[in-house]
């Protein structure tokens, strides 16, 4: 395995980190294709396990590897910022069209950067506006899924406005600006609303910059913008995190945890004992089944223990130990039969003899019918046509060579060859000397005639090579002819061994007379099978005998080669039928043998001997099977170690991420609460347990009575307000870690007391805005709105909007009237419409706002804006605002008095002052705001 970087096919960052380096854990992680692929094809784990078992089977001395601690690459992956949206955005405007409480708006709702507070009474459409944003990003309404039984029918068609004309459609559009400056226009168009069943889902189409997005394109875009989690906190989702189960809380942070792939891998990294039999031995496990059968049949515990201990022997000793254990069990359970056996083979011979004896008692001629050899590789090679043709061709070649030599020696007679042999013998005996002089032939010694001249001797000697060549070639012919003859003999003998000769008629009659009916039928069938086989093999047998008779052992070159060739062709053609006929005969004999054996098996001792004999005769396959079982156990132990390593890696990741969540929530909590007795302590992740080691997140609180501190489950002790604050802390922590740059909060201070309204406004909102986050708050709480306006009286990025519901036009959103400049702008608009009384009222409250903001910015540090919440402008002037304004803009004092007198002209039956007066008053008040440097007031 290489050490170059490996990117895991799942794309998961943690699995990629775990795939680097060289270890068995790395090998396992790389074999995992990723959860979606693994769900389609689950064979990857079986393939990996089989390969590891095969590895251990081929390397029996090797033990399982144990994964080391998570690699440094995992630490680096954890430290890398995860979960951030690649293109976080801020919301520029939003426009719902016939969505829930909205009908048609003349223009989008403009949402400046910084803090935007949208207030209005209950049922004015605040939640509809928040849900418009939610539906734009998800195509769903969370509120629908959170309701209990009966809700589906009650929330049928809950997306579209119930008064939508038939020619109108429901859509929501928004303009976003990413941190990179890109402007994106989104529009989601409803195609099907919720139905009346709990399983019904709405459908819609999302457009980006006017182009329809395919489903995967939509997912990719929303992942880039917000990592697939809409950055909004709804009233009905505020308590979801806190009141969920520990296991469900994990889902809340799921996008940040990014542990799905690793969790799936942990769940699948198991091959339990019940699955081990599925991974069969290369032999098929037949021998192991025989071994288990003997263990079950053993009547005593000692024998079972002997076998169990043998199974655990090291591979290097396993074969010897199994043989010894099998013999030992035989001596224990087959008492008196194999006691004298020194080896397992000796014991097998003794037991087989006993089994044959018992079977023969039930059917005496069984021993005569037993095939004397099995069909094996040696027999198949013997009967191969190519082998026969090869031997025959070799014989023909030798005969042709002999004939050629004999033709070359036609001038030399047999007598000459005999004389040549005689000369050799005489020379070796010394009867003829090596001389150039004529000499007397020792065979003609009674006639002293010098007949053996040197020339005559040389002539006789020249006949020698021819004589030797003929002798040599005759020897070759003899050897090759014998091979052909032996082949024919071997085939004929194999025929007799595979299908023994039929017993005499009287033997059959006697055996069948005493045989039970269960034996008679298979015995007759075997006899018929043997008769048919002999008939089918008659041509083969005849050809074999012809070859044997046609090649005399004393003078093979004199054989009728043409006749032998014809006979061998018959043998080659008919030989396969010997295999098929012998196979059928063996099956018929096995049926008869089993029927006879069944009579004997009624004796438990016979059955036990048969069971012992089956495994004693199959030790080679038993060694393979038990070695395979040991290999599987080593692979299983290795997989368990891998799983432990994966769990450790998962826990390492989880602890690091949990610390981020917990620390983030603590930070937010401290901005919201200053509780002394009970306070949020931490998120706690207990040790994984159960199937798949599911993640659970528990919320802990610390109780402090100034004497001791105790950590408990938060839900036991937290008030409703604390639970509420904890939900906000969880949401804001998740949003910050996901990289959201825009947050929408729907009535976030419900269930809080007034003290924490101010904490939220003065601590938490500056904390979020300080991180460059756009915060959009919808609320119906007027006191909270005022607290926010006091805190942000001089903020540069602070906007208020007002939402109301019109019977004729549905939900409407207008410029707010919290700030002085907003009040003056609205007063001018009302005056232009002739609504002077209402316009002058707004001028008066604008003055009060200017006085309040003056005190907040320039007054004493301990000034409490709430103390002026019900005070008149005159009171504000005399209680400090007047002195500050006189010091900064002394010339404005008379003008302010004049403006206030005009603002009350509509009272006491005095008509309101005209448009010109109002316009002048608004102009002068704006100038004062600039002079006092409270431009955001």
Image (cartoon, rainbow, N blue to C red):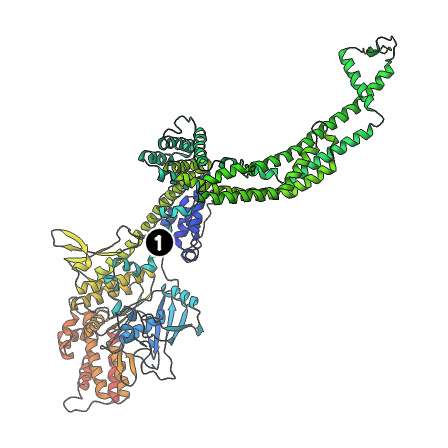
* Label 1 CA crowd tier, 10 Å (few <14, some 14–19, many 20+): some
Q: Find numbered disc 1 in the image and state the secondary structure of the residue it sits on.
A: helix
Side of 382 where 61 appears, left or right = left
Closer to us: 776 or 935:
776
- Residue 540 spot, x, y in % from top left: 64, 40
Say which quarter of the image contains residue 150: bottom left
Instruction: Work out whether 833 lies above or below 402.
Output: below
Q: Which residue is mark 1?
A: 263
Q: Nearer the viewer, residue 378 or 893?
A: 378
Residue drawn at the location 67% of the way across and 42% of the way down: 570
Residue 631 visible in image? no
Above or below, comparing residue 427 to residue 637 in the picture: above
604 versus 217 height, above or below: above
Q: Position of residue 420 (x, y in %)?
A: 80, 19
List x then y, in percent, for residue 607. 39, 38
Left or right of residue 731, residue 498 in this image: right
Q: Is residue 441 left or right of residue 617?
A: right
Task: Specify the quadrant of the image occupied by residue 359.
Answer: top left
Taking depth in this image into account, of 853 and 186 the one nearest to the observer is 186
The residue depicted at 21 percent of the width and 65 percent of the height is 724
Name the quarter where the C terminus is drawn.
bottom left
Q: Residue at x 31, y 77 (%)?
A: 100
Residue 205 shows in this picture = yes
644 on left or right of 497:
left
Residue 67 placed where, x, y %? 37, 43
- Total labels: the figure holds 1
């Amino acid at each position: 395995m290489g050490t170059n970087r490996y990117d895991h096919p799942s794309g998961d960052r943690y699995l990629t980190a775990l795939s680097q380096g060289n270890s068995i854990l790395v090998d396992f992680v790389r074999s995992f294709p990723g959860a979606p692929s693994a769900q389609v094809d689950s064979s990857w784990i079986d393939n990996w396990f089989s390969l590891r078992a095969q590895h251990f089977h081929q390397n029996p001395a090797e033990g399982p590897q144990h994964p080391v601690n998570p690699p440094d690459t995992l630490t680096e992956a954890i430290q890398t910022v995860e979960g951030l949206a690649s293109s976080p955005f801020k919301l520029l405007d939003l426009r719902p069209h016939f969505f829930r409480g909205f009908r048609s708006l003349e223009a989008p709702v403009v949402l400046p950067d910084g803090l935007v507070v949208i207030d209005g009474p209950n049922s004015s459409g605040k939640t509809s506006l928040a849900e418009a944003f939610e539906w734009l990003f998800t195509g769903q309404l969370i509120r629908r899924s959170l309701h209990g039984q009966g809700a589906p029918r009650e929330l049928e068609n809950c997306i579209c406005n119930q008064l939508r004309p038939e020619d109108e459609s429901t859509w929501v559009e928004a303009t976003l600006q990413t941190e990179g400056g890109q402007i994106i226009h989104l529009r989601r168009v409803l195609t099907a609303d919720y139905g009346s069943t709990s399983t019904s889902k709405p459908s819609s189409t999302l457009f980006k910059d006017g182009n329809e997005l395919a489903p995967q394109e939509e997912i990719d875009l929303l992942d880039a913008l917000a990592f697939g989690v809409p950055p909004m906190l709804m009233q009905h989702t505020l308590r979801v995190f806190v009141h969920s189960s520990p296991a469900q809380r994990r889902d809340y942070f799921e996008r940040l945890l990014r542990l799905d792939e690793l969790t799936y891998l942990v769940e699948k990294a198991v091959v339990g004992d019940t699955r081990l039999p599925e991974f069969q031995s290369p032999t098929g496990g037949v021998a192991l089944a025989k071994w288990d059968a003997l263990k079950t049949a053993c009547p005593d515990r000692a024998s079972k223990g002997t076998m169990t201990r043998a199974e655990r022997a090291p591979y290097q000793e396993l074969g010897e130990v199994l043989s010894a254990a099998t013999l030992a069990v035989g001596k224990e359970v087959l008492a008196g039969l194999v006691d004298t056996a020194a080896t397992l083979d000796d014991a097998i011979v003794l037991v087989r003899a006993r089994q044959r004896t018992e079977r023969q008692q039930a059917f005496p001629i069984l021993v005569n019918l037993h095939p004397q050899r099995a069909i094996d590789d040696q027999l198949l090679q013997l009967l191969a046509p190519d082998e026969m043709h090869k031997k025959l061709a070799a014989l023909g070649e030798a005969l042709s060579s002999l004939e050629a030599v004999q033709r070359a020696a036609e001038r030399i007679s047999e007598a000459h060859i005999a004389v040549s042999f005689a000369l050799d013998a005489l020379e070796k005996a010394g009867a003829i000397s090596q001389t150039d002089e004529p000499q007397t032939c020792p065979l003609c010694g009674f006639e002293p005639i010098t007949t053996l001249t040197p020339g005559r001797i040389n002539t006789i000697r020249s006949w020698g090579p021819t004589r030797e060549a003929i002798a040599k070639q005759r020897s070759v012919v003899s050897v090759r002819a014998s091979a052909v003859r032996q082949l024919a003999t071997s085939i004929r003998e194999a025929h007799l061994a595979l299908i023994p000769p039929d017993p005499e008629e009287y033997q059959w009659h006697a055996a069948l007379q005493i045989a039970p009916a269960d034996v008679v039928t298979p015995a007759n069938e075997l006899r018929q099978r043997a008769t048919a086989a002999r008939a089918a093999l008659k041509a083969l047998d005849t050809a074999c005998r012809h070859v044997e008779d046609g090649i005399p052992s004393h003078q093979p070159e004199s054989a009728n080669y043409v006749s032998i060739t014809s006979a061998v062709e018959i043998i080659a053609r008919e030989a396969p039928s010997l295999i098929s006929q012998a196979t059928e005969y063996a099956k018929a004999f096995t049926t008869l043998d089993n029927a006879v054996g069944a009579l004997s098996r009624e004796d438990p001792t016979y059955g036990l001997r048969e069971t012992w004999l089956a495994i004693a005769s199959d030790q080679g396959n038993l060694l393979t099977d038990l070695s395979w079982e040991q290999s599987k156990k080593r692979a299983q132990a290795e997989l368990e170690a891998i799983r432990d390593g994966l769990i450790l890696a998962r826990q390492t990741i989880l602890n690091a991420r949990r610390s981020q969540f917990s620390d983030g929530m603590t930070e937010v909590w401290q901005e919201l609460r200053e509780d002394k007795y009970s306070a949020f302590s931490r998120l706690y992740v207990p040790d994984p347990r159960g199937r798949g080691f599911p993640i659970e997140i528990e919320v802990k609180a610390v109780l402090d009575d100034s004497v001791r501190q105790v950590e408990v489950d938060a839900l036991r002790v937290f008030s409703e307000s604390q639970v509420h604050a904890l939900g906000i802390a969880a949401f804001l922590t998740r949003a910050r870690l996901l990289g959201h740059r825009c947050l929408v909060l729907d009535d976030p201070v419900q269930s809080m007391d007034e003290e924490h309204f101010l904490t939220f406004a003065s601590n938490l909102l500056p904390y979020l805005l300080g991180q460059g986050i756009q915060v959009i708050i919808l609320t119906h709480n007027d006191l909270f709105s005022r607290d926010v306006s006091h805190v942000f009286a001089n903020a540069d990025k602070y906007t208020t909007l007002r939402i109301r519901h019109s019977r004729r036009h549905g939900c409407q959103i207008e410029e707010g009237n919290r700030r002085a400049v907003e009040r003056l702008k609205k007063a001018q608009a009302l005056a232009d419409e002739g609504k002077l009384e209402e316009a002058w009222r707004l001028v008066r409250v604008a003055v009060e706002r200017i006085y309040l903001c003056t005190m907040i910015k320039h007054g004493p540090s301990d000034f409490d804006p709430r103390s002026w919440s019900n005070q008149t402008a005159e009171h504000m002037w005399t209680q400090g605002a007047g002195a500050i304004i006189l010091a900064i803009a002394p010339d404005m004092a008379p003008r302010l008095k004049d403006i206030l007198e005009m603002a009350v002209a509509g009272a006491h039956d005095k008509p309101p002052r005209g448009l010109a007066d109002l316009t002048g008053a608004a102009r002068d008040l704006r100038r004062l705001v600039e002079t006092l440097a409270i431009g955001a007031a």
